[in-house]
Image (cartoon, rainbow, N blue to C red):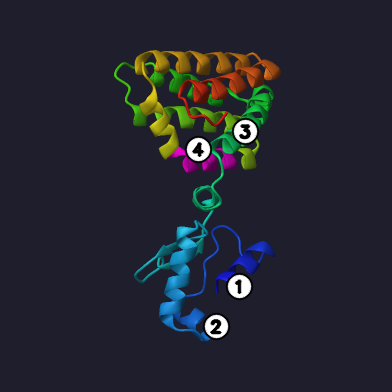
Amino acid sequence: MLTQIQEKILDGRLRVGDRLPSERDLVEALGVSRNSVREALRVLESMGIVDAHVGSGRDAGSTVAGRSTDALGNLLRLHMALSQFRLGDLVDVRIELERLAVTRAAAEAGTDDLAQLHALTRAMAEPGMDHERFHELDAEFHIRLARASRNALAADLMQALRDAVKSEMIAAFGRVRDWDATVATLTSEHRAILAAVEAGQGEKAAALVTRHIRGFYESAGTGED
């Protein structure tokens, strides 16, 4: 069943929002047990491929979802655990995505994009910022920069990368000796990146974001760069 649904998505017969056949119809069509169908649907839901709604009525059943970043994030976490990728390798990939994003954002970002990014930098400067809250704001800032580039794949990959290393990022924040000073420095660097994007200076923004990312990992002592 998993393979059949994947093939239908790949060849365009199933698209986001399309409803899958009922469990009964799937059982009859595939010649498998209801338990097998339910297990397959659970797997597809965990991968972000379908949204399952139990019960009866109009909203019951499963539909094809558009949560590609959930699936990407899960796959990256598993690959990092099983393949033992160095965090530094992932950081290198992230830097290239970030450079692409800010370069494009400098040419494409609209008024709403810039307003949201400014709001995030203001939120970062609020006193008493804890590690997890700052990580949320930091991740959202970089993801919104990617969205402002108008490259949907770059934005999805960026979010998946951030999701995959969330625990490592929070742990890195915890290793920082002077947290308040680090927050001030990172927020200042975010503002400088945003200023370059807002001024349409793509190359400058790319250089700033590279220095920003590598500088943090070096200061946090990851030993990966």
Residue 103, percent from left and from top: 68, 24
Q: Quadrant of the C terminus?
A: top right
Label at residue 4:
1
* Left or right of 146 in this view: 222: left
Q: Do the residues labelled 1 and 2 touch (CB within 8 Å)?
A: yes
Type of the residue with mark 1: Gln
Label at residue 30:
2
Distance between the Cα atoms at labels 3 and 2? 44 Å
Distance between the Cα atoms at labels 1 and 3? 36 Å
Q: Mark 4 points at which residue?
A: 162
Which is nearer the N-term, disc 1 or disc 2? 1
Type of the residue with mark 2: Leu
Residue 73, percent from left and from top: 51, 47
Which is nearer the N-term, disc 1 or disc 3? 1
Quarter of the image where one finds residue 210: top right
Residue in the foreground of this view, choosing between 185 and 41: 185
Residue in the foreground of this view, choosing between 210 and 52: 210
Residue in the foreground of this view, choosing between 74 and 51: 74
Type of the residue with mark 4: Arg
- Give the farthest residue toward the left: 128
Q: What stretch is highlighted in magenta?
A: 155-166
Distance between the Cα atoms at labels 4 and 1? 31 Å
Q: In this view, does 4 lie above or below 175?
A: below
Q: Do the residues labelled 4 and 1 touch (CB within 8 Å)?
A: no
Q: Is mark 4 on a helix, strand or loop?
A: helix
Which is nearer the N-term, disc 4 or disc 3? 3
Distance between the Cα atoms at labels 1 and 2? 10 Å
Q: Is mark 2 on a helix, strand or loop?
A: helix
Near mark 2 (Cα within 10 A), the count class, few <14, some 14-19 or many ≥20, is few
Mark 3 or 2, closer to the camera: 3
Residue in the foreground of this view, choosing between 192 and 14: 192
